[in-house]
Amino acid sequence: MATKYIFVTGGVTSSLGKGIISASLAKLLQARGYSVTIQKFDPYINIDPGTLNPYEHGECYVTEDGAETDLDLGHYERFLNKPTSQANNVTTGRIYYNVIMQEREGAYLGKTVQVIPHITDEIKRRMLLLGESGEYDIVITEIGGCVGDIESLPFVEAVRLRWELGANETCVIHLTLLPYLKAAGELKTKPTQHSVRDLSEAGVQPDILVCRSEHPVPLDLRKKIALFCNVKQNAVIESLDAETIYDVPLLMRKEKLDERVISKLKLPHKSEPDLDTWKEFLGRLKNPTSEVNIALVGKYVELPDAYKSIIEAFVHAGSANECKVNIKWFQSENMNEENVASLLHNMDGVLVAPGFGERGFKGKLEAIKYVRENNIPFFGICLGMQCAAVEFARNVLGLEGAASTEMDPETPHPVIDMMEDQKQITKKGGTMRLGAYTCELKKGSKAYNIYGKSKISERHRHRYEFNNKYIAAFEAAGMMATGTNPDTGLVEVIELQNHPWFVAAQYHPELKSTVLNPHPLFVKFVKAAINNAKLK
């Protein structure tokens, strides 16, 4: 079967949830037996989001092959339980970079290089790339931004390749908003009409409209939208606000979104979607038998999207434990020796989040000192692990001034230091230790017992590492290096003996947690928090 292509565009406003709709549709099609993948095209000129502040686009998601990507790829992986790669996220910057490099190499000799056809041809090439691999029955392409934005125009223009592929080979889904005017007491369709008009003026007529709304969309309004937007009435899909993002596949199934797509693409109805496992996950999630409060200590706590994968990993782990996980947000900048006890004493567990830079570093050290001394389950990730090492060096080993050279280049005790192969690097984009690396766990350690095996693979995003010169002193005092990279000796996991649950990892376990495979570290951390709550 030739690969079919689905394009998802958005209108009226951003943040409507194109990524969740794309992932939900992909899940439904996958549950019918089709092989599906999703790719995201972002209209910004950065080559990738690796150098962006989380305040711009939320977390930077890292794939197995080390691509720094948009956070929507995390949704794709969590829903489909399949890894994505460099090929699944493309930016305007990457497109222009590829075209300019070809121009410099002489690929267009004698030609004037223009947005059309050269930029749009490169976009089309990337749109078809995954489909040409032969691995997938269906490729879903999410176009970032809003229809009508200047920066999105080349991508919308490229979607016109549907006429080159054939009428039954592609499907365009347009996600739009039906605002509710309280004074008038009704939903308004005019913004949707204008959005579809803009899309049509660009040469792309949507096949299906997914209408985000806070209120049910009545039949007469669906008829009106279908009439004015030139789509079939049954192709006007209602998308109400959901209790969790994991409800959306079931809501879209109820609205028959997958059936409309299958009909448009002339795909055989392989079978009804098998969503039993998904429903079991939701059943456990919505009917918890216990409840815990877990503190997330970080410097972007006013922006939860900066820790999106961590939040979702707690959702997966909560369901696995039939436990409601309440994440309590603590700004590490505001945490100090005087207030740390009052802030954290009621917490059942504490996670110190990843990040970069000195801001909030001292507060993280205070949080770790408190949970270490008071036997509260602790989980450190990336910078959280480095903070745990610095705190232990200062307060247990008595190494005055111990620090990471990221925070204090002149520290007399660099227990965390820049990796050797990073010291000569001056360019910032895509130059960190990125992607999946092997880690070997010591038998008998907590980490080994949690994973149930000695060799694991986890994803990384860092420049600094534990300084192995201090391993002997750390282990003599009870902080064990229980996970190391077999090729470099890089310490990947540290854990404290004689503590209920004190584990910190240099890698990012949250990036591999999915609905079907919740990450074991998060599952056991939540379990430890449940046990701690019972002791109170």
Image (cartoon, rainbow, N blue to C red):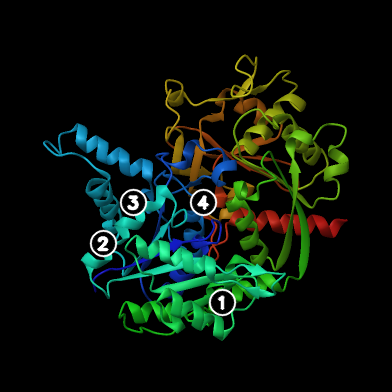
> In this rendering, which labeled residue sits more in front, label 2 or label 1?
2
Q: Amino acid at mark 4?
A: Leu
Where residue 359 appears, as percent x and y from the top left, is 68, 30
Where residue 43 appears, as percent x and y from the top left, is 42, 48
For the image shown, how many numbered marks are present on the structure? 4
> In this rendering, which labeled residue sits more in front, label 3 or label 1?
3
Q: CA distance from mark 2 to mark 3?
A: 12 Å
Q: Earlier in the sequence, mark 2 or mark 4?
A: 4
Q: Nearer the viewer, residue 48 or 37?
A: 48
Q: Earlier in the sequence, mark 1 or mark 4?
A: 4
Residue under circle 4?
Answer: 71
Q: CA distance from mark 1 to mark 4?
A: 23 Å
Q: CA distance from mark 2 to mark 4?
A: 27 Å
- At x 71% / y 59%, what residue is drawn? 527
Q: Earlier in the sequence, mark 2 or mark 3?
A: 3
Image quadrant where residue 427 sits: top left
Residue under circle 1?
Answer: 251
Q: Amino acid at mark 1?
A: Leu
> In this rendering, which labeled residue sits more in front, label 4 or label 3?
3
Mark 2 packing: few (<14 Cα in 10 Å), some, or many (20+)?
Answer: some
* 146 vs 186: above or below: above
> In this rendering, which labeled residue sits more in front, label 2 or label 4?
2
Q: Earlier in the sequence, mark 4 or mark 3?
A: 4
* 410 vs 150: above or below: above
Secondary structure type for disc 4: loop
